[in-house]
Amino acid sequence: MSTEPNINDGFDEEAFRVEADTPRVIVCSDNAETREVAAILSSSVDLDCVAFDGVATIRQQLVEHGGEVLVLSADRAEESLAQDLKRLRPHLSIVMVSADTTVEQVTRAMRTGAVDFIAGEFEPKDIQARISRAAKRTIELRSRDQRNRRLGEIARRIEEVTEDSALESIPEAKSDHDVDSNLVDRVSMQTEFRTLLRQELDVEDLLRTALEYLLAKTGPTNAAVFLAGGDGRFGLGAYVNYEYARRLVEPLLQRLCDEVCPRIAEETELLRFDDASEFVADCELGSEVDTDLDVVAIPCHHEGECLAVMYFFRRMDAAFSDETADLLNDLRGMLAEQIAILIRIHNRMESDWPEEPSDADGESDWDDLAA
């Protein structure tokens, strides 16, 4: 989150500058080297250069002009100054310049938090390129934090609404002893799961967090999550390797993706394969994979649309219980809800669903589905 303070009676100039604006560079031109840099930058059409004399007015200049990059002489590097600048402009990129290079100067520059140290003869193209890179760093950091701040606020408001809704679902009791403790536990678990998911704004991180939580509740199991592609097709988003490496069950995963996911997407209930052994045997996985598996499918819907399908499978001697069905039924909608949020976010940003998943080392009765 951005900690950048508001100034000028609450108006934060830097927060309202857009990336399309010309990056602003402030040069403290109090010696020959910095004056030369200021002269070079003043001729650049891609940078807005403001030069002034004296370190004493740095803070004032940043308040009045804002800026992406501050250029200082290496002799001016002070940790106390760097701390003040960090509080004033958290994303500011500091660039040090010097006629020569000494260990002491480089050390001070590092302690000051400089992102670049330019020494020796100053080539105009090199100077402009390096200052531009520093400005780009500032813009990207500021844009990222502003985006995270907005998304965090949205997530917080959604969390407040969903938590209130969850609490309202608990029936009013005549006394404390009348409250169904199992229902309270389920609501508490739903709130915990939703809170964890709301913190994840990356698809891979979301799937990892969701599976880690679910497998902690269901016990060790192999698991795969397939994400809807919007065209009726599905793609593998994540795979958890409990006892079978992904390469061993690739044919099984492919069939689940191509043949089963489209059918599961039309279902509203959790499903258990009633002929899982035959289905697994047909995949010809080899002797390393036991065909006697318990396979369950969990469609994840949001507003009537199936956004993901999860499969859990493990040996029949550790078959899934009806309590596991209740658990997954309680939580699957929350995963779909967060996926829907990420879809909206990713539609506004240039990001993609993960192309390759990463391996990780998890109503009252099950419905049946013939594979």
Image (cartoon, grey):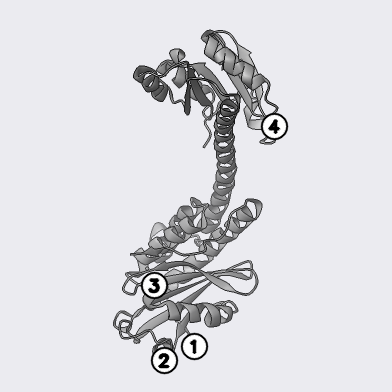
The residue carrying mark 3 is 246
User: Between 349 and 7, which is closer to the camera in this rendering?
Assistant: 349
State the residue in front, 326 or 245.
Answer: 245
Amino acid, disc 3: Arg
Pointers 1 and 2 in contact (CB under 8 A)? yes
Q: Earlier in the sequence, mark 1 or mark 3?
A: 3
| Image location (x, y in percent) of residue 192 | 43, 55
In the rendered structure, are the residues bearing label 1 and label 4 in contact, judged by CB atoms less than 8 Å apart? Answer: no
Label located before the other in sequence (4 or 2): 4
Residue 129 visible? The answer is yes
For the residue marked with disc 2, what is the amino acid? Glu
Which element is circle 2 on? Answer: helix
Q: Name the residue under label 1.
A: 371
Residue kind at label 4, given as amino acid type? Asp
Which residue occupies 42% across, 22% down? 109
Residue 38 image point, x, y percent: 61, 17
Question: 319 left or right of 197?
Answer: left
Residue 238 sits above or below residue 72 on the image: below
Residue placed under numbered mark 4 in the picture: 21
For disc 1, the neighbor class at 10 Å (few under 14, some 14 to 19, many from 20) is some
Q: How far apart are marks 4 and 2 (CA)?
A: 63 Å
Picture layout, residue 158 above or below residue 179: above
Judged from the image, the secondary structure of the residue bearing numbered disc 4 is: loop
Q: Please, what secondary structure does the residue beneath circle 3 have?
A: helix
Marks 4, 2: nearer the viewer: 4
Q: How far apart in space, not on screen, are marks 4 and 3 (Cα)?
A: 48 Å
Mark 2 sits on what residue? 278
